[in-house]
Image (cartoon, rainbow, N blue to C red):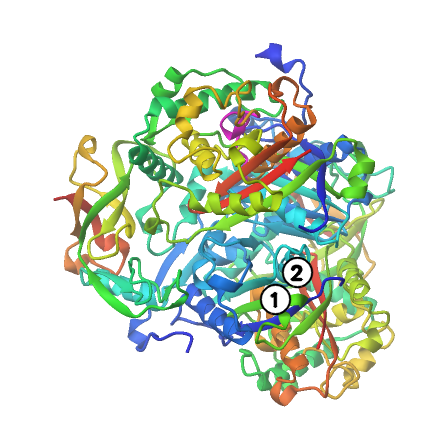
Amino acid sequence: MKRLKESMPVLPGTGLKDEDFQKGRVLFTRWKADAKYKWDAGIAIGRYLAGLKQGKILGVKCYKCERIMVPPRIFCEWCFRNIDEWVVLKDTGRVNTFSLCYVTWDVKRIKEPQIPAVIEIDGASPGMGIMHLLGEVDPKKVQVGMRVKAVWKPVEQREGAITDIMYFKPI
Amino acid sequence: MAMKERVERVDDVKVWYGELPVNSLYTAGIGGEQFFRTLKDQGVITGTKCEECGVIYVPGRIFCQRCLAKLERWVKVGPEGTLESWTVLHLGLDGKPMVEPQIVGLIKLDGASTMFVHRLGNVRLDQLRMGMKVRPVLKPKSQREGAITDIKFFEPA
Amino acid sequence: MGRRVAIVGAGMTKFVRRAQETGKELAFYAVREALNYCGMKLNQIDGVVLGSAPDTFDGVHMKGEYLSDGAGAWGKPYMRCLVGGGTGVFAVAHGWYHVASGVFNTCLVVCEEKMSSFQPHAQAAFLTIFDHTTERPLKPNLLWIFALEMNRYMSTYGIRKEEIALVAVKNKNNALDHPAAQLTAPVTVEDILKSEVLAWPVQRLDVSPVSDGAVALVLAEESIARRVTDKPVWIEGVGWSLDTAYWTNRDLCYPRYVEEAARMAYKMAGITDPRHQIHVAEPYDPFDYKELHHMEGLMLCGRGEAPQLTVDGVTRRDGELPVCPSGGLLGVGNPIAAAGLMKVAELFYQLRGEAGKRQIARKAKRGVAQAWGDLMQVGTVVVAGI
Amino acid sequence: MKKRVAVVGIGVTQFRSITPDVSYKEMVYEAAVKAYQEAGVDPRRDVDTFVSCSEDYHEGTSIFDEYVPDQLGAALKQVQTIAGEGLHGVVAACLQIMTGEFKVAVVETHSKASNMLTPDGIAVCAQDPVFNRPLGLNNLFIAGLEMNRFLYKYKLSKAHCSRVVQKNRCYALNNPIAGRGALLTDEDFATARMVAEPLDQLDFAQPVDGALVVVLAAEDVVGRLKGKPVWIEGMGWCNGAVSLESRDWDTLDYVTKAGDMAYRMADVKNPIEEFSFAEIDDTYSYKELQHLLALRLVTAGELGDSLLAGQFGLNGKLPVNTSGGALGMGYLHEATGLARLYWAVKQLRGEAGKNQLLNPRKAVVQSWRGLPTTSAVVLVLSS
């Protein structure tokens, strides 16, 4: 591609390769941030987590727009008013979309894919999903629209967390 | 009432723990490379001069903050300088009191227009005076790695 | 609309995988190039706005403050905007209102990103964009949301990967003519379809590279603009919109927030028929399908129709509606905020007829640039014209 | 300013050291509901643009902008984040209104400082990673260096700083939202633990949680809204040299420039005489004194004596920080400036309760972004 580059202006900027660091050709420093947090879950998410510990997926309802929402919130973001009612949703749903992911969050390759999905939860308004993982399924057979059900951790291992659901599996 | 509902029992308060997992590698940069190489190899502190503004920046940098001129003229400064302020720092990065408080100085190196920030050492608190002369104590050449910590601290000159 | 505001200068660094320069130095280079482009000096600049994506990339807390001297903000009014990936185009809107308000006559818009600082790979920084309590425990990565959105888009409209891959081919090949470009080898549809699967349907070559780089523009009000250049490029409209954070409650097949942002910008620019009144487009293309998604959100075609336009060659440089003639993020590189601003810089070059080998075949009087970001949530749009 | 903008509503939550019962979203929702009610606006219908101010490391979330819209009623509307101080957000909103494209704007900031488990470890990440951070020093060393030099240069003492602390924390007792009000005695100061000499633990503002939402409107629509307007007559903002090495350690040139810009816009010719009161940054005790000087609210020769003579108290010539300041209300990170704006609005409306001044007309409000920054915003307000 040299041919094309020749007529172009040369812009500033110095590209380095990994080996420039390894071989000590350039100077650098490192830092690991000590940035730890304890986030207040608050009213809505606090109750959501408590529900998960009991094996329930909780949603909220706004009487004005009549939406049943999940994850719960204390306000309806479209009507800008307090929500009116807590609703126990089903732990089943439908795959809205999914992926077969061969890379972990910290960019390590994996052989068996993770299958993240948006799952529309039964009992909530249409299109109301949460993000979670699919399991006990052949990656090749996952489809948009597939019916799934939550697989919960045993009661004694639950801690009030989204991971109290291990994954959703096909039904 | 802003909120119809509140957490009513202390037992129902919930939290979630987490962090920002940030591991960073910072290049010294074009200016930093030159500055630290000279410090490492020659044990000399250098700055760059803006011909337009007449300012000598230490550590040397490749641009003038005032006029954004590209700076290419490197000059040697110090090694001695004047103490322009100091503090005795008692808190560590964890926010807790340190066993050994650290004395930190604001130093104007001879020939520089700007300040230099580093630790002070070999000095008693009652010796500290505004305007006192100080000089850098460098690590031995073999231990220097091209970083600000190649200077161990500044001591009374 | 307030006072007329023009872009009078643009400058940028190379986009590279790992820059030796610090973030400050990258910003400095870009600003210097931009000022030189229009023959202005820093003391003629009233204020500075900075755009840069999350601090976790550069690994500097309050990154805007850190970058301020490199961005030319010493002793000047200075502010940093942040709307995730939408930042680069938004920064122009941010600069626009500084000048259109009548408070400033000139303003620098600077965008910088140094993603290589994040170790071992900038991708991992994206874990922390998800909700800390309800999503992060699942260890998501950025590929998830792109893959989830891409799959939804494909399955809603029955789009094939081959059609989407054409976008990557077009843009990566366009970038061969861009002096800032990080990628310098031509690619084919086969290369893309054979590249490693990261998160199906996303494959390695569907994705833009991680980059370091900086871009700067100089904005000026009308009388100064006319003095500085005989070819001012006017900011005719700006728009932005942020959708709900509850992204799993939305249908990902269509970016309605881009449409909202476009409607705002078009209204300001007096555009009623975008398909015909816009002559060149730089929609945001961090992944190949995103260009298509965004063409639809920008109402340059109907929903689900963008792939066909690509197949038909309409979006090529010699086509009727050139799209990403710069080479886009897919080809030039993706230093997040800087990449967005690069798109507006491309409109500047194209509309002035200064894009060199990248110059589009048709005559263009008006273009649109757009960026996208947050949790598939924000649209930012700039309409520029001569 | 040519096109005038007014504050027509402001909502605030209690500032508390911890707020374990609400999430940040819920805290902001509460402030938003209050602000909209005061202004008489419906965010879904009446608000044209929203500005939020936050820093990712304070929230523990990258691109915190994502999580802004819902609790403000701003979803699918014009929303942006400024990674800056709350008063930067006010400036951004005013600029937008002044283009003529927007009539009603909302600014939001909040602090969930209590959710940071490692605040010092987070703060140090703002230091230059190459030239400063490897020294491994807590950010407070910068305040220590600056304070020591300032006291020396201006012939002031710790007693002056303690006086500021005493004044502000006492005033906070009469501010119902303040989280750090206290009556401090000489003994408290004598026994205060040193953190970065001469700075001690009483010299700096302790963090609190809280949220603020402000509604701003263009002059031509103010009459249609319910809220009692307080006018923004001038605004200025400025950054100085960010690097510790190349900054001017003697004068806060950036505060002076921001002040002069705001004064010019508001046609303030003689700041010492024209303001009824000031709400200025006091994140560290000595900062209040530095800012008084930089904003030309007192001369260097008169600073120490005026302070000790009570000239900056409720009955003084220029009451300063009758809110309690950051020392008395608590430090709210990005929201600190909006807390001062809140109190200035209360004073100008005559709603400041026991700390109400007699008939105030014009005020100056200033914020600073904290260590290690050189970034300030100044507003001039009138009733």
Element class at badge 2: helix
User: Which residue is identified by label 2?
Assistant: D94
Mark 1 or mark 2, earlier in chain? 2
The structure residue drawn at horizontal position 51% and vertical position 58%, both measured from the top left corner, is D58
Instruction: Point out the stretch of residues depicted in magenta.
Output: C326-336
Instruction: Name the spot of residue D35 as percent of width and height, x first.
Output: 52, 72
Q: Are circles 1 and 2 on residues that touch, CB within 8 Å? A: yes
Say above or below: C359 vs C379: above
Q: Classify 10 Å Cα crowding around label 2: few (below 14), some (14-19), many (20 and above).
A: many
Instruction: Name the spot of residue A148 as percent of width and height, x first.
Output: 17, 46
Horizontal placement of A115 versus B42: left or right? left
Q: Chain of mark 1?
A: D
On whether residue D141 falls in the magenta region, the answer is no
Q: CA distance from mark 1 to mark 2?
A: 8 Å
User: Which residue is identified by label 1?
Assistant: D216
Q: Classify 10 Å Cα crowding around label 1: few (below 14), some (14-19), many (20 and above).
A: many
Q: Amino acid at mark 1?
A: Leu
Say above or below: A76 vs C142: below
Quadrant of residue A88 within the rendered picture: bottom left
Say above or below: C101 vs B68: below
Quadrant of the rendering where the C terminus of chain C is positioned? top right
Element class at badge 1: strand
- Along the line of sight, the residue nearer the viewer: B11 or B23: B11
Instruction: Name the spot of residue B45 as percent of width and height, x first.
Output: 75, 39
Which residue of the protein is positioned furthest toward the front in this rendering? C272
Horizontal placement of C89 versus A49: left or right? right
Q: Is residue D242 visible?
A: no
Quadrant of residue C169 within the rendered picture: top left
The disc label shown at residue A166, or none: none
